Image: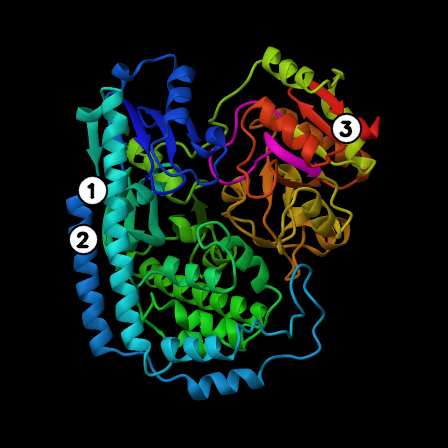
């Protein structure tokens, strides 16, 4: 059975082609359009999927879409907000005046500055009038009214947007003659399906956590024998995704794109300053969670105007971890399982994933590599074409387009670049890296999902802890996390603690681990201020040429790790085509580009 999976069209529109439960092709529209988190029908990615598979639209059996129709989604939204209105009346948020005064007394003094931020002790003041407004609307007497108004505004916008994207979906399918093959489902079914069916686990707790989907913000299910049975639903707007988006926005970042920056920023702060105050808005009991006035963004804005950014970020991260772990731990015990699989946008939070894996009784953890909404179409397409029983775990996510040598050479020649073809290429790339050069690698099929996993990556040695500053400046980025390391599978125990049971998740950069003292000493550029790293473990049977580069570098340096960051410029998608790669290579002032079997050094370096 051949199923075309389409992710939600509101952001990160993604196409997946699945045959009998096996993903044949998957890629996001943004990689082709070059529009970050592309919204709308994925015409370009869909055309490339059909080209790759050498089929026409008429050979598609089913089109899978992970939302109900506009009327069905509107009904679920309105039901959720009726419940929210009742909750606001019956359970108002407590006064925080005393808690916030105590929190101000706990702010540490004399901290060193965080690169790219004002002094850690500087408060992000918006002016006295705005700060007073945020206090009144966020924690003061006007907060309940503000919460009701913001909830209504969210509902109106969400209803309008769902209608728009549903119209776009139908129009796009009609052009291809596929409208009659459309099959819809409730949103969290698709998250649960990709997490469980790709894990290879027979019996597992299936946890989905995101901002919003079909009236829910999460779900708990039991996966067993290839089937998934939901046990509990986490209601919207009691949403950990909305909770985290509010602080991302309030600290000055884009809520849909930059949540990872808050994870990195949190490590610099003290969670004890504000966590108690933030935690008072949560009710956690019996595997469920309620968050009072969760859509009231003025709460986080007030705290961001009153406290250091790093302490606000630390509080949100800590409370997120506490809440997620409380839910997971309850259902692990209730269902008597020792394996957990995770999906949904909140599960992009790699530190939260580490905390979940560290829970007593959790022996195995898998995080779906494209955990956000971009992976939903894949999950539903897998489920609709699943042959039954328990399948093998996903081997890799090199599922996008691949380009021939003629196309690679044409892209180089268009810019007047004269490549060499060293043999073996891995040895020459390793030599350049050992000499302190920055090397971009473009090879094979493009990765599916948010992470660059070697085929569209920028590589550097991990000896220089300052690389996070100067290389990000070259690429036009601002980051607070160190670059992630790629590490040889066979050397993993030398570098990280707590891997057991999550090694496979670590092949996709979806979870952090505490670093060993050896790693901290020999690869400091990849270790965060809290002593953790988000590794990619690479096995030779999965990506032989990439593995060989790291192995050759180890032979020269004694270190089985390299820094790996995505091959793209600031606020651009990861490169897709050879032309994209050559353009980013020249603009990013990268020292060398390994483009397929070819190697070219930057003109300034020759």
Where is mark 1, residue-wise? 68
- Sooner in the amino-acid sequence: mark 3 or mark 2: 2
Q: Are marks 2 and 1 in contact (CB under 8 Å)?
A: yes
- Horizontal and vertical percent for residue 591? 76, 32
Regarding residue 286, the answer to whether it shows in the image is no
The dominant secondary structure in magenta is: loop
Left or right, 259 with reference to 139: right
Quarter of the image that includes the N terminus: top left
Regarding residue 410, the answer to whether it shows in the image is yes
Disc number at residue 76?
A: 2
- Sooner in the amino-acid sequence: mark 1 or mark 3: 1
- Horizontal and vertical percent for residue 384? 25, 31
Q: Secondary structure at mark 3?
A: loop
Q: Nearer the viewer, mark 3 or mark 2?
A: 3
- Horizontal and vertical percent for residue 590? 73, 34
Q: Where is residue 558, by image quadrant?
A: top right
- Horizontal and vertical percent for residue 256? 44, 51
Identify which residue, 267 or 357, lies in the foreground: 267
Magenta-tinted stretch: 442-459
Identify which residue, 80 or 455, lies in the foreground: 80
Left or right, 420 with reference to 178: right
- Sooner in the amino-acid sequence: mark 2 or mark 1: 1
Q: Residues within 10 Å of mark 3 (few under 14, many from 20)?
A: some
| Picture residue at 39% right of the left edge, 67% below the top | 297
Q: Secondary structure at mark 1?
A: loop
| Picture residue at 21% right of the left edge, 62% below the top | 81
| Up/down of 599 relative to 93, above or below | above
| Picture residue at 23% right of the left edge, 36% below the top | 167
Where is mark 3, residue-wise? 602
């Amino acid at each position: 059975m051949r199923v075309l999976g389409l992710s939600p069209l509101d952001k990160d529109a993604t196409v997946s082609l699945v045959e009998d439960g096996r993903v044949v092709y998957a890629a996001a529209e943004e990689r082709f359009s070059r529009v970050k988190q592309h919204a709308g029908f994925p015409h370009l990615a869909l055309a490339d999927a059909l080209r790759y598979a050498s089929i026409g639209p008429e050979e598609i059996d089913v089109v899978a879409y992970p939302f109900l129709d506009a009327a069905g989604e509107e009904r679920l939204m309105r039901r959720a907000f009726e419940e929210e209105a009742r909750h606001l009346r019956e359970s108002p948020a407590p006064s925080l005046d005393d808690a916030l005064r105590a929190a101000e007394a706990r702010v540490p003094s004399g901290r060193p500055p965080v690169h790219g931020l004002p002094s850690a002790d500087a408060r992000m003041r918006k002016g006295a009038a705005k700060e007073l407004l945020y206090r009144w609307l966020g924690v003061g007497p006007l907060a309940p009214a503000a919460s009701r108004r913001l909830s209504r505004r969210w509902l109106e916008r969400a209803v309008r947007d769902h209608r728009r994207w549903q119209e776009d979906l139908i129009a796009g399918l009609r052009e291809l003659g596929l409208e009659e093959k459309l099959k819809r489902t409730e949103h969290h079914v698709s998250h649960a399906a990709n997490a469980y069916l790709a894990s290879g686990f027979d019996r597992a707790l299936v946890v989905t956590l995101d901002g919003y989907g079909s009236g829910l913000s999460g779900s708990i299910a039991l996966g067993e024998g290839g089937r998934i049975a939901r046990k509990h639903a986490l209601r919207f707007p009691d949403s950990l995704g909305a909770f985290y988006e509010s602080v991302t926005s309030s600290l000055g970042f884009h809520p849909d794109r930059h949540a990872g920056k808050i994870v990195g920023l949190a490590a610099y702060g003290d969670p004890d300053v504000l966590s108690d105050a933030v935690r008072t808005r949560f009710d956690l009991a019996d595997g469920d969670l309620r968050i009072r006035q969760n859509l009231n963004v003025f709460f986080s804005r007030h705290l961001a105007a009153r406290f250091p950014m790093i302490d606000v970020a630390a509080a949100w991260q800590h409370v997120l971890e506490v809440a997620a772990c409380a839910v997971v731990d309850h259902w692990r015990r209730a269902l008597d399982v020792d394996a957990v699989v995770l999906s949904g946008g909140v599960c992009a939070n790699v530190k939260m994933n580490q905390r979940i894996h560290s829970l007593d009784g959790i022996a195995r953890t898998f995080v779906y590599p494209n955990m956000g909404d971009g992976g939903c179409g894949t999950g539903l397409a897998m489920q609709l074409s699943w042959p039954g029983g328990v399948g093998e775990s996903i081997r890799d996510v090199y599922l996008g387009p691949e380009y021939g040598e003629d196309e690679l050479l044409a892209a180089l020649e268009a810019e007047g670049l004269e490549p060499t073809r060293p043999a073996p290429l891995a040895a020459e790339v390793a030599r350049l890296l050992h000499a302190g050069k920055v090397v971009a690698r473009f090879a094979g099929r493009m990765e599916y999902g948010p992470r660059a996993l070697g085929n569209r990556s920028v590589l550097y040695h991990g000896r220089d802890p300052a690389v996070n500053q100067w290389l990000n400046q070259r690429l036009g980025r601002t980051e607070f996390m160190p670059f992630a390391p790629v590490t040889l599978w066979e050397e993993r125990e030398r570098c990280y603690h707590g891997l057991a049971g999550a090694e496979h998740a670590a092949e996709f950069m979806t979870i952090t681990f505490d670093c060993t003292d050896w790693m901290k000493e020999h690869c400091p550029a990849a270790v965060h201020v809290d002593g953790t790293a988000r590794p990619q473990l690479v096995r030779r049977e999965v990506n032989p040429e990439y593995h060989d580069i790291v192995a050759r570098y180890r032979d020269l340096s004694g270190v089985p790790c390299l820094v790996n960051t995505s091959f793209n410029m600031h606020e651009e998608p990861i490169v897709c085509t050879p032309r994209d790669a050559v353009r980013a290579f020249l603009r990013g002032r990268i020292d060398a580009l390994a483009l397929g079997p070819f190697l070219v050094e930057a003109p300034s370096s020759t």
